[in-house]
Amino acid sequence: MPNVTSDTLTSICLNVFEKLNISESEAEIVTRSMVNANLVGHDSHGVIHLPKYVREIEEGVIVPGASIDTIQESASISVLDGNWGFGPVIATHAVKLAIQKARQTDVSTVTVSQCNEIGRLGDYVCLAAEADMIGILMVNDHGGGTCVAPYGGTEGRLSTNPIACAIPLASQNPIVLDMSTSVVASGKIRVKQRLNESAPEGWLINSEGKSTTNVEDFYRETPASILPFGGIAAHKGFGLSVIVDILAGALSAAGCSRNKDARVGNGLYIHVINIASFRRFSGFSAEIERFVAYLKSAKTVVGEDTILMPGERGWNEKQKRERDGIPIDEETWRQIQALVWRLM
Protein backbone atom coordinates (compact mmCIF):
# COMPACT_ATOMS: atom_id res chain seq x y z
CA MET A 1 0.00 0.00 0.00
CA PRO A 2 1.70 3.24 -1.14
CA ASN A 3 2.09 6.23 1.16
CA VAL A 4 1.60 9.47 -0.74
CA THR A 5 2.06 13.05 0.46
CA SER A 6 -0.88 15.42 0.48
CA ASP A 7 1.02 17.68 -1.94
CA THR A 8 1.40 14.81 -4.42
CA LEU A 9 -2.29 13.89 -4.19
CA THR A 10 -3.26 17.54 -4.60
CA SER A 11 -1.07 17.87 -7.70
CA ILE A 12 -2.51 14.68 -9.24
CA CYS A 13 -6.11 15.79 -8.68
CA LEU A 14 -5.53 19.32 -9.99
CA ASN A 15 -3.78 17.98 -13.10
CA VAL A 16 -6.65 15.57 -13.79
CA PHE A 17 -9.21 18.36 -13.49
CA GLU A 18 -7.11 20.62 -15.69
CA LYS A 19 -7.14 17.96 -18.43
CA LEU A 20 -10.94 18.01 -18.18
CA ASN A 21 -11.02 21.83 -18.51
CA ILE A 22 -12.44 22.31 -15.02
CA SER A 23 -11.97 25.87 -13.74
CA GLU A 24 -9.13 26.40 -11.30
CA SER A 25 -11.45 27.61 -8.54
CA GLU A 26 -13.74 24.56 -8.73
CA ALA A 27 -10.81 22.15 -9.07
CA GLU A 28 -9.18 23.57 -5.94
CA ILE A 29 -12.34 23.25 -3.84
CA VAL A 30 -13.05 19.66 -4.93
CA THR A 31 -9.41 18.63 -4.53
CA ARG A 32 -9.18 20.17 -1.06
CA SER A 33 -12.34 18.32 -0.03
CA MET A 34 -10.89 14.95 -1.06
CA VAL A 35 -7.35 15.41 0.25
CA ASN A 36 -8.53 16.86 3.58
CA ALA A 37 -10.74 13.80 4.05
CA ASN A 38 -7.74 11.52 3.53
CA LEU A 39 -5.60 13.60 5.89
CA VAL A 40 -7.99 13.15 8.83
CA GLY A 41 -8.43 9.44 8.12
CA HIS A 42 -11.78 9.53 6.29
CA ASP A 43 -10.42 7.56 3.33
CA SER A 44 -13.96 6.63 2.27
CA HIS A 45 -14.47 10.31 1.33
CA GLY A 46 -11.02 11.00 -0.10
CA VAL A 47 -9.26 10.47 -3.42
CA ILE A 48 -11.04 7.15 -3.78
CA HIS A 49 -13.68 9.43 -5.37
CA LEU A 50 -11.44 10.92 -8.07
CA PRO A 51 -12.20 8.24 -10.72
CA LYS A 52 -15.89 8.55 -9.84
CA TYR A 53 -15.80 12.34 -10.28
CA VAL A 54 -14.16 11.96 -13.69
CA ARG A 55 -16.70 9.36 -14.80
CA GLU A 56 -19.61 11.50 -13.64
CA ILE A 57 -18.22 14.58 -15.42
CA GLU A 58 -17.86 12.59 -18.65
CA GLU A 59 -21.37 11.14 -18.27
CA GLY A 60 -22.91 14.55 -17.57
CA VAL A 61 -23.94 13.67 -14.02
CA ILE A 62 -21.75 16.46 -12.65
CA VAL A 63 -22.17 19.79 -14.44
CA PRO A 64 -18.96 21.83 -14.01
CA GLY A 65 -19.60 25.56 -13.73
CA ALA A 66 -23.29 25.07 -12.96
CA SER A 67 -25.05 28.13 -11.55
CA ILE A 68 -26.23 28.07 -7.95
CA ASP A 69 -29.70 29.59 -8.03
CA THR A 70 -31.58 31.19 -5.15
CA ILE A 71 -35.14 29.87 -5.05
CA GLN A 72 -36.26 31.72 -1.93
CA GLU A 73 -34.52 34.10 0.44
CA SER A 74 -34.94 36.34 3.47
CA ALA A 75 -32.42 38.02 5.74
CA SER A 76 -31.81 34.80 7.67
CA ILE A 77 -32.56 31.95 5.23
CA SER A 78 -31.85 30.86 1.69
CA VAL A 79 -33.18 27.98 -0.39
CA LEU A 80 -30.66 27.09 -3.10
CA ASP A 81 -30.71 24.94 -6.25
CA GLY A 82 -27.24 23.67 -7.16
CA ASN A 83 -28.24 22.55 -10.70
CA TRP A 84 -26.17 19.38 -10.23
CA GLY A 85 -22.78 21.06 -10.09
CA PHE A 86 -19.85 19.82 -8.02
CA GLY A 87 -21.10 18.97 -4.53
CA PRO A 88 -18.12 20.47 -2.66
CA VAL A 89 -18.43 23.71 -4.65
CA ILE A 90 -22.14 24.05 -3.89
CA ALA A 91 -21.76 23.13 -0.22
CA THR A 92 -18.88 25.58 0.27
CA HIS A 93 -20.92 28.37 -1.29
CA ALA A 94 -23.96 27.50 0.86
CA VAL A 95 -22.03 27.42 4.14
CA LYS A 96 -20.27 30.71 3.39
CA LEU A 97 -23.65 32.25 2.62
CA ALA A 98 -25.02 30.95 5.94
CA ILE A 99 -22.03 32.47 7.77
CA GLN A 100 -22.59 35.80 6.04
CA LYS A 101 -26.26 35.79 7.02
CA ALA A 102 -25.55 34.79 10.62
CA ARG A 103 -23.31 37.85 10.99
CA GLN A 104 -26.36 39.97 10.26
CA THR A 105 -29.20 37.99 11.82
CA ASP A 106 -27.55 36.02 14.68
CA VAL A 107 -28.61 32.62 13.30
CA SER A 108 -29.19 31.46 9.74
CA THR A 109 -30.41 28.46 7.81
CA VAL A 110 -29.64 27.47 4.22
CA THR A 111 -31.06 24.46 2.39
CA VAL A 112 -29.86 23.03 -0.91
CA SER A 113 -31.27 20.69 -3.55
CA GLN A 114 -29.90 19.31 -6.84
CA CYS A 115 -26.43 18.99 -5.33
CA ASN A 116 -24.05 16.14 -6.11
CA GLU A 117 -22.25 14.34 -3.30
CA ILE A 118 -20.34 16.78 -1.08
CA GLY A 119 -17.87 14.37 0.58
CA ARG A 120 -16.78 14.74 4.20
CA LEU A 121 -19.17 16.96 6.15
CA GLY A 122 -16.61 17.99 8.77
CA ASP A 123 -14.80 20.28 6.33
CA TYR A 124 -17.84 22.50 5.87
CA VAL A 125 -18.86 22.96 9.49
CA CYS A 126 -15.23 23.88 10.23
CA LEU A 127 -15.69 26.90 7.93
CA ALA A 128 -18.21 28.19 10.47
CA ALA A 129 -15.87 27.39 13.35
CA GLU A 130 -13.11 29.39 11.65
CA ALA A 131 -15.51 32.35 11.79
CA ASP A 132 -16.09 31.77 15.55
CA MET A 133 -19.54 30.37 14.85
CA ILE A 134 -21.21 27.02 15.43
CA GLY A 135 -21.91 25.13 12.22
CA ILE A 136 -24.46 22.31 11.88
CA LEU A 137 -24.92 20.35 8.66
CA MET A 138 -27.30 17.50 7.86
CA VAL A 139 -27.38 15.60 4.58
CA ASN A 140 -29.54 12.97 2.94
CA ASP A 141 -29.03 11.27 -0.44
CA HIS A 142 -31.64 13.36 -2.30
CA GLY A 143 -34.16 10.49 -2.01
CA GLY A 144 -31.80 7.80 -3.36
CA GLY A 145 -29.05 5.73 -1.80
CA THR A 146 -31.52 3.80 0.35
CA CYS A 147 -29.06 1.30 1.81
CA VAL A 148 -29.92 1.54 5.53
CA ALA A 149 -32.65 -0.61 7.05
CA PRO A 150 -35.18 1.11 9.33
CA TYR A 151 -35.21 -0.21 12.86
CA GLY A 152 -36.98 -3.59 12.76
CA GLY A 153 -36.74 -3.86 8.96
CA THR A 154 -34.55 -5.92 6.63
CA GLU A 155 -34.57 -3.74 3.50
CA GLY A 156 -32.86 -0.43 2.78
CA ARG A 157 -35.24 2.50 3.19
CA LEU A 158 -32.90 5.31 4.33
CA SER A 159 -29.55 6.67 3.24
CA THR A 160 -26.72 6.93 5.77
CA ASN A 161 -28.04 10.44 6.59
CA PRO A 162 -24.95 12.00 8.23
CA ILE A 163 -24.84 14.95 10.58
CA ALA A 164 -21.90 17.19 11.50
CA CYS A 165 -21.35 19.98 14.00
CA ALA A 166 -18.27 22.10 14.75
CA ILE A 167 -17.76 24.05 17.97
CA PRO A 168 -14.97 26.68 17.83
CA LEU A 169 -12.39 27.13 20.58
CA ALA A 170 -10.01 30.05 21.05
CA SER A 171 -6.80 28.08 21.62
CA GLN A 172 -7.55 24.55 20.39
CA ASN A 173 -8.83 22.80 17.31
CA PRO A 174 -12.63 22.90 17.14
CA ILE A 175 -14.72 20.08 18.52
CA VAL A 176 -16.05 18.32 15.42
CA LEU A 177 -18.81 15.74 15.43
CA ASP A 178 -19.06 14.10 11.99
CA MET A 179 -21.09 10.92 11.93
CA SER A 180 -23.55 8.91 9.92
CA THR A 181 -26.82 7.97 11.58
CA SER A 182 -26.15 4.44 10.31
CA VAL A 183 -23.61 2.25 12.09
CA VAL A 184 -21.15 3.01 9.28
CA ALA A 185 -20.92 5.13 6.13
CA SER A 186 -21.43 3.18 2.91
CA GLY A 187 -18.06 4.37 1.63
CA LYS A 188 -16.32 2.49 4.43
CA ILE A 189 -17.78 -0.73 3.07
CA ARG A 190 -16.19 0.13 -0.29
CA VAL A 191 -12.87 0.65 1.49
CA LYS A 192 -13.20 -2.78 3.14
CA GLN A 193 -13.89 -4.29 -0.28
CA ARG A 194 -10.79 -2.62 -1.76
CA LEU A 195 -8.69 -4.01 1.10
CA ASN A 196 -10.24 -7.50 0.77
CA GLU A 197 -11.40 -7.31 4.38
CA SER A 198 -14.59 -8.50 6.03
CA ALA A 199 -17.02 -6.13 7.67
CA PRO A 200 -17.22 -6.23 11.47
CA GLU A 201 -20.22 -7.93 13.05
CA GLY A 202 -23.08 -5.48 13.46
CA TRP A 203 -22.57 -3.50 10.24
CA LEU A 204 -24.76 -5.44 7.80
CA ILE A 205 -27.80 -7.68 7.68
CA ASN A 206 -28.89 -9.67 4.64
CA SER A 207 -32.38 -9.71 3.12
CA GLU A 208 -33.43 -12.33 5.68
CA GLY A 209 -32.39 -10.09 8.54
CA LYS A 210 -29.36 -12.17 9.46
CA SER A 211 -25.99 -10.62 10.27
CA THR A 212 -23.32 -10.88 7.55
CA THR A 213 -19.67 -9.87 7.44
CA ASN A 214 -19.24 -10.46 3.68
CA VAL A 215 -18.96 -7.01 2.10
CA GLU A 216 -19.84 -8.46 -1.31
CA ASP A 217 -23.35 -9.04 0.04
CA PHE A 218 -23.80 -5.26 0.03
CA TYR A 219 -23.35 -5.15 -3.76
CA ARG A 220 -25.60 -8.07 -4.76
CA GLU A 221 -28.86 -7.75 -6.73
CA THR A 222 -30.70 -8.30 -3.45
CA PRO A 223 -28.29 -6.36 -1.28
CA ALA A 224 -27.49 -6.53 2.39
CA SER A 225 -28.49 -3.42 4.35
CA ILE A 226 -26.55 -1.28 6.79
CA LEU A 227 -28.01 -1.02 10.28
CA PRO A 228 -28.85 2.24 12.07
CA PHE A 229 -26.29 3.07 14.76
CA GLY A 230 -27.03 2.15 18.35
CA GLY A 231 -26.72 -1.62 18.60
CA ILE A 232 -29.38 -2.76 21.06
CA ALA A 233 -30.65 0.85 21.04
CA ALA A 234 -30.67 1.20 17.25
CA HIS A 235 -34.13 2.76 17.42
CA LYS A 236 -32.29 5.93 18.50
CA GLY A 237 -30.10 5.98 15.39
CA PHE A 238 -33.17 5.27 13.28
CA GLY A 239 -35.07 8.12 14.89
CA LEU A 240 -32.22 10.58 14.33
CA SER A 241 -31.93 9.42 10.72
CA VAL A 242 -35.62 10.17 10.14
CA ILE A 243 -35.16 13.73 11.43
CA VAL A 244 -32.07 14.29 9.25
CA ASP A 245 -33.95 12.98 6.20
CA ILE A 246 -36.83 15.39 6.84
CA LEU A 247 -34.66 18.48 7.41
CA ALA A 248 -32.26 17.76 4.55
CA GLY A 249 -34.82 16.29 2.17
CA ALA A 250 -38.28 17.77 2.76
CA LEU A 251 -37.24 21.28 3.83
CA SER A 252 -34.84 21.65 0.89
CA ALA A 253 -37.29 20.10 -1.63
CA ALA A 254 -34.62 17.54 -2.55
CA GLY A 255 -37.03 14.89 -1.30
CA CYS A 256 -36.87 12.33 1.49
CA SER A 257 -35.69 8.76 0.91
CA ARG A 258 -38.02 6.99 -1.49
CA ASN A 259 -36.52 4.30 -3.75
CA LYS A 260 -33.31 3.00 -5.24
CA ASP A 261 -34.16 4.51 -8.64
CA ALA A 262 -34.09 8.08 -7.33
CA ARG A 263 -31.03 10.02 -8.42
CA VAL A 264 -28.38 10.00 -5.71
CA GLY A 265 -27.12 13.39 -4.67
CA ASN A 266 -27.22 15.35 -1.44
CA GLY A 267 -30.01 17.42 0.04
CA LEU A 268 -28.48 19.85 2.54
CA TYR A 269 -29.68 21.50 5.73
CA ILE A 270 -27.18 24.06 7.09
CA HIS A 271 -27.60 25.98 10.33
CA VAL A 272 -25.09 28.54 11.62
CA ILE A 273 -25.13 30.18 15.06
CA ASN A 274 -23.19 33.38 15.67
CA ILE A 275 -21.81 32.92 19.18
CA ALA A 276 -21.08 36.64 19.56
CA SER A 277 -24.82 37.32 19.35
CA PHE A 278 -25.28 35.38 22.59
CA ARG A 279 -22.13 36.14 24.57
CA ARG A 280 -18.49 37.12 24.22
CA PHE A 281 -16.63 34.44 22.31
CA SER A 282 -13.80 34.45 24.86
CA GLY A 283 -16.20 33.54 27.66
CA PHE A 284 -17.89 30.86 25.57
CA SER A 285 -14.54 29.32 24.63
CA ALA A 286 -13.29 29.38 28.22
CA GLU A 287 -16.39 27.49 29.38
CA ILE A 288 -15.98 24.84 26.65
CA GLU A 289 -12.29 24.43 27.48
CA ARG A 290 -13.17 23.97 31.16
CA PHE A 291 -15.81 21.43 30.15
CA VAL A 292 -13.35 19.51 27.96
CA ALA A 293 -10.76 19.41 30.77
CA TYR A 294 -13.41 18.10 33.15
CA LEU A 295 -14.38 15.31 30.73
CA LYS A 296 -10.76 14.36 30.18
CA SER A 297 -10.13 14.19 33.94
CA ALA A 298 -12.18 10.99 34.20
CA LYS A 299 -10.27 7.77 34.89
CA THR A 300 -9.80 5.75 31.72
CA VAL A 301 -10.61 2.12 31.10
CA VAL A 302 -7.85 -0.44 30.62
CA GLY A 303 -6.19 0.03 27.25
CA GLU A 304 -7.08 3.70 26.85
CA ASP A 305 -4.53 6.39 27.67
CA THR A 306 -6.79 9.39 27.29
CA ILE A 307 -10.34 10.47 26.57
CA LEU A 308 -10.69 11.89 23.08
CA MET A 309 -13.17 14.62 22.23
CA PRO A 310 -15.24 14.43 19.01
CA GLY A 311 -12.91 15.15 16.10
CA GLU A 312 -9.71 14.80 18.14
CA ARG A 313 -8.82 11.46 16.59
CA GLY A 314 -9.00 13.11 13.16
CA TRP A 315 -6.76 16.02 14.19
CA ASN A 316 -4.21 13.52 15.55
CA GLU A 317 -4.39 11.48 12.35
CA LYS A 318 -3.87 14.63 10.29
CA GLN A 319 -0.61 15.36 12.12
CA LYS A 320 0.55 11.78 11.55
CA ARG A 321 -0.34 11.72 7.86
CA GLU A 322 1.18 15.14 7.22
CA ARG A 323 4.39 13.71 8.64
CA ASP A 324 4.33 10.15 7.27
CA GLY A 325 2.15 10.39 4.18
CA ILE A 326 -1.35 9.18 3.32
CA PRO A 327 -1.85 5.42 2.81
CA ILE A 328 -3.77 4.68 -0.39
CA ASP A 329 -5.10 1.18 -1.02
CA GLU A 330 -3.66 -0.63 -4.04
CA GLU A 331 -6.88 -0.68 -6.08
CA THR A 332 -7.56 3.04 -5.61
CA TRP A 333 -3.95 3.85 -6.51
CA ARG A 334 -4.17 1.63 -9.60
CA GLN A 335 -7.35 3.39 -10.74
CA ILE A 336 -5.82 6.83 -10.19
CA GLN A 337 -2.67 5.92 -12.10
CA ALA A 338 -4.76 4.51 -14.98
CA LEU A 339 -6.80 7.70 -15.00
CA VAL A 340 -3.69 9.87 -15.19
CA TRP A 341 -2.30 7.85 -18.10
CA ARG A 342 -5.62 7.94 -19.97
CA LEU A 343 -5.82 11.72 -19.73
CA MET A 344 -2.20 12.41 -20.68
Image (spheres, rainbow, N blue to C red):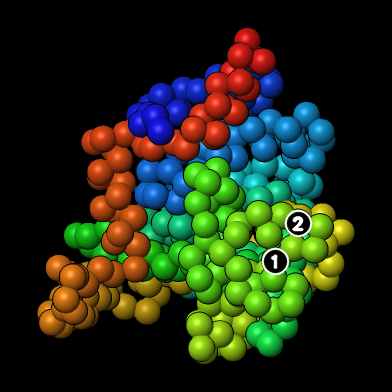
Q: CA distance from mark 2 to mark 1?
A: 8 Å
In the depicted structure, whether residue 148 falls above or below residue 321? below
Residue with the mark numbered 1: 224
Q: Are marks 2 and 1 in contact (CB under 8 Å)?
A: yes
Q: Quadrant of the C terminus?
A: top right
- Residue indicated by mark 2: 220
Q: What is the x, y in percent for residue 67?
A: 75, 42
Q: Secondary structure at mark 2?
A: loop
Name the residue: 26% across, 35% down: 324
Residue 300 visible in the displayed image: yes
Between residue 61 and residue 24, name the one nearer to us: 61
Could you tell whether 22 is left or right of 33 in the image? Answer: right
Q: Is residue 114 left or right of residue 15?
A: right
Q: Is residue 240 visible?
A: no
Considering depth in this image, is 272 or 211 the residue closer to the camera? 211
Q: Position of residue 14 (x, y in %)?
A: 53, 24
Task: Point out the residue furthest to the right here.
Answer: 261
Looking at the image, which residue is at 70% across and 49% down? 116
Q: Can you say which quadrant of the picture contains the N terminus?
A: top left
Looking at the picture, which amino acid does disc 2 mark?
A: Arg
Front-most of residues 175 and 8: 8
Please rate how many residues cluster around mark 1, counting C-alpha atoms within 10 Å: few if below 14, some from 14 to 19, many from 20. many
Whether 24 is drawn above or below 214: the answer is above
Q: Residue at x 38, y 43 (%)?
A: 39
Q: Is residue 189 above or below residue 281?
A: above
Q: Position of residue 165 (x, y in %)?
A: 45, 68
Residue type pointed to by label 1:
Ala
User: Image check: 9 left or right of 19?
Assistant: left
